[in-house]
Amino acid sequence: MSRPYNFSAGPAMLPEPVLRQAQEEMLDWRGTGQCVAEMSHRGKAFLRIAQEAEADLRELLDLPEEYQVLFLQGGASSQFAMVPLNLLRKQGDAADYLCTGSWSKKAIAEGKRYGAVRVIDGSVDGRFIRVPAQDSWAPNPEAAYVHYTPNETIQGVEFPYVPETGSVPLVADMSSTLLSRPLDVSRYGLIYAGAQKNIGPAGLTLVIVREDLLKEPLPGTPTMFRYKTHADAQSMYNTPPTYAWYLAGLVFRWLKALGGLQEMARINERKAKHLYAAIDASDFYDNPVEPDCRSWMNVPFTLADPSLDERFLAEAAEAGLLTLKGHRSVGGMRASIYNAMPEAGVKALVDFMADFERRYG
């Protein structure tokens, strides 16, 4: 039986070769007689897994030496608090936040607990359909950092540029874009990403932070919420999410075998163009996002007749196309086409959409 195509926004589908390797190694990792989930995180076997995973990630990203990689828990949502706790020097210090959708709004709400947050609003009449043009705003030179969300998973809005922030550190929530294409990490002070889209299973959060930002956090910051705690302990201060770390390492190796992030970018661009072309060529489907700000990863779309939504979802599921329902705050449909979604899956969706339109349009 062939596996269906899972268009979930996260936890998302994982590469089939990764799942098959994990299956083969489930009861015995490399002759140890142990499942990785059973291993001591301080034992030689798991330390080897952790070191290989970090080395492969550094190679994929061409990561400069002055950046630390942290393998943490808590999801990207915990980073909404950890960023201001660690980058603001005292309560009330300033930070800039670009607001382009649901996830940046949540980061802003948390940042306001700790600092004087200035919001650069990217909405258009209350809707998020584009990002603010670079020349429409300038960072506060006194800000401790500028925070943005390169890709808004819910609205399907993506920055076509990396914000210029001068000497102010740039912070990015890359939960749905990290590893989807090449990245110049040197332009950022800090990057964080929940794993459950392009990296691995839920439960792991990656933080990539420039070493000069590993300073004393706000007074009263708990030990576990200090980046330096985890950097000094090589992400082993407490028991890390070991099995998720292992699976992420398998994903990194899969990406390397594929040809790295340059090749992944070519595949992702083709997938997105194929799906958007089908939507734009139709009067039956619509995507509201301005073309130059459309996401490669998350493609929301609506049907001309919303009364057909449930039928579309039911028939799509019967055709092996799963989890296409849009977020409750937006409605309609959403196809998340992360790294693990093969081009054949996007083609199957486009063919189904055309057939559904012929029958009900």
Image: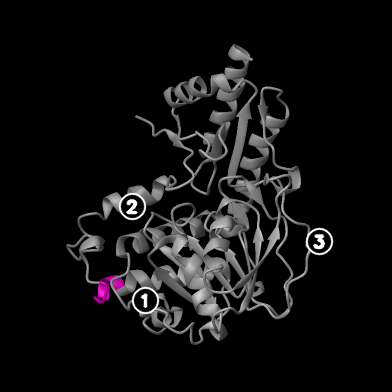
Query: Measured from the top left, where is residue 65 in percent x and y?
Result: 55, 81
Characterize the local packing of mark 2: few (<14), some (14-19) or many (20 or more) Cα atoms within 10 angstroms.
few
User: Residue 143 sits in which quadrant?
Assistant: bottom right
Q: In which quarter of the image is the N terminus?
A: top left
Instruction: Classify residue 190 as left or right of residue 40.
Output: right
Q: What residue is shown with label 2?
A: 21
Q: Where is residue 180 shown, x and y percent of the image?
A: 57, 55
Q: Distance between the residues labelled 2 and 1?
A: 33 Å
First along the sequence among labels 2 and 1 = 2
What is the x, y in percent for residue 181? Answer: 61, 57
Query: Who is closer to the viewer here, 221 or 203?
Result: 221
Q: What residue type is labelled 3?
A: Ser
Give me the C-alpha separation between circle 1 and circle 3.
Answer: 38 Å
Q: Residues within 10 Å of mark 1 (few under 14, many from 20)?
A: few
The amino acid beneath tag 1 is: Met
Residue displayed at 55% across by 82% down: 213
Residue at left 54%, top 29%? 348
Q: Are marks 1 and 3 in contact (CB under 8 Å)?
A: no
Which of the two marks, 2 or 3, is nearer to us in this view?
3
- Any mark on residue 136, and which? 3
Residue position marked by numbered label 1 in the rendering: 224
The boundaries of the magenta stretch are 41-46
Q: Quick one: label 2 or label 3, which is nearer the N terminus? A: 2
Q: Nearer the viewer, residue 257 or 153?
A: 153
Vertical side of 129 occupied by 239: above or below = below
Q: In which quarter of the image is residue 98?
A: bottom right
Q: In which quarter of the image is the C terminus?
A: top right
**Residue at screen point 58% across, 47% down:** 297
Instruction: Say whether residue 42 is magenta.
Output: yes
Q: Which residue is drawn at 68% across and 44% down?
A: 127
- Label located before the other in sequence (1 or 3): 3
Rendered view: 283 above or below 127:
above
